[in-house]
Image (spheres, grey):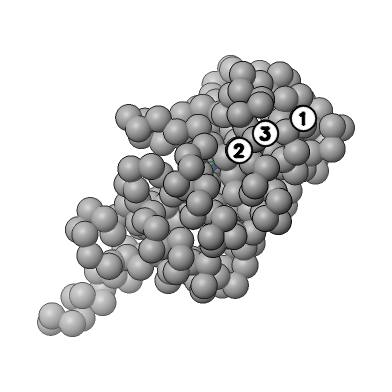
Amino acid sequence: MLLGVNIDHIATLRNARGGVEPDVIKAAQIAEENGATSITTHLREDRRHIKDEDVYALINTLKTRLNLEMAMADDIQEIALDIKPYSICLVPERRQEVTTEGGLDVAGQLEKVTEFIKPLLDAGIIVSLFIDPDIKQVEASAKTGAQFIEMHTGSYAECFGYKEEEIEFQKLKKAAELAQKLGLKVNAGHGLNYENVHRMHEIKGLCELNIGHSIISRAVFTGLSEAVCKMKDLIK
Ligand code: PXP
């Protein structure tokens, strides 16, 4: 199974000060050097973390693949067509949400989704649809022309360790099986962490996991000792 690392929260931290630190390009390079098979980033309408110049810099420096998460917005589609990432992942977006809260309603807007992704597919960009593990959404996704779905693992992650875990996990398993039967390739992501990720191996044929928040959070602690020691050394 491949690992796509989402670097959005490197940019969140950078933007808190408005400067250049920490550098998202460097973060992407470190992720790649340590086995990330792609770098994922979400260019949001409000540009709250990743900015246009970041995606342009990433496309020129990445050694692996850029997976651009985006909503159905014309201006972002224009950027995607300009930079031509390896893949895009279509996500729903609400301005007030803290993070992507649910999957894209493909079944409820089949025509709109199909039309929106057509120019991207025509440009040779792989298209993935971020959906809840719901039979209706999987069936609709298979009609759009997209090659991939990314299953939203947020509910599974939230229920992990509770009695509802199995129900949420089985939804993922069944959705993946159906998607593959319908000719779709399957990725997964959202809320996966160092405790709950191991069950993804129980889902046959998953291609790639896209993981951000838990990796960046862990990096703070695995890197903090060195950072404090180095500063202490400099000022002693
Ligand atoms: N996949 C998609 C489509 C997402 O929107 C996100 C969050 O930006 C992720 C994966 C990664 O989620 P997390 O940061 O919880 O690992």
* Circle 1: residue type: Lys
Q: Nearest to the eye among marks 2 and 1: give it.
A: 2
Tell me where residue 142 sits by quadrant.
top right
Mark 1 or mark 3: name the one nearer the start of the chain: 3
Q: CA distance from mark 2 to mark 1?
A: 13 Å
Question: Badge 1 local density, few (<14 within 10 Å), some, or many (20+)?
Answer: some
Residue 53 is situated, as x and y percent measured from the top left of the image, at: 38, 63
Mark 3–mark 2 distance (CA, rounded to whole Å) = 6 Å
Pair 1/3: label in front: 3
Marks 3 and 2 in Cβ contact (< 8 Å): yes
Residue at point 65%, 47% (across, down): 119
23 displayed left or right of 198: left
Judged from the image, the secondary structure of the residue bearing numbered disc 3 is helix
Which residue bears the numbered disc 3?
A: 114
Q: Is mark 2 within 8 Å of ligand 1?
A: no
Measuring 76% from the left and 24% from the top, which residue is drawn there? 139
> Can see residue 208?
no
Q: Nearer the viewer, residue 184 or 111?
A: 111
Q: Say if mark 1 contacts mark 3, CB within 8 Å.
A: yes
Coordinates of residue 35 in the picture (x, y in percent): 61, 66
Q: Earlier in the sequence, mark 2 or mark 1?
A: 2
Q: Is residue 105 above or below residue 194?
A: above
| Res. 116 mark | 2
Image quadrant assignment for residue 115: top right
Q: Amino acid at mark 3?
A: Thr
| Residue type beneath disc 2 | Phe
Judging by the rendered image, the residue that carries numbered circle 1 is: 143
Q: Residue furthest left?
A: 236
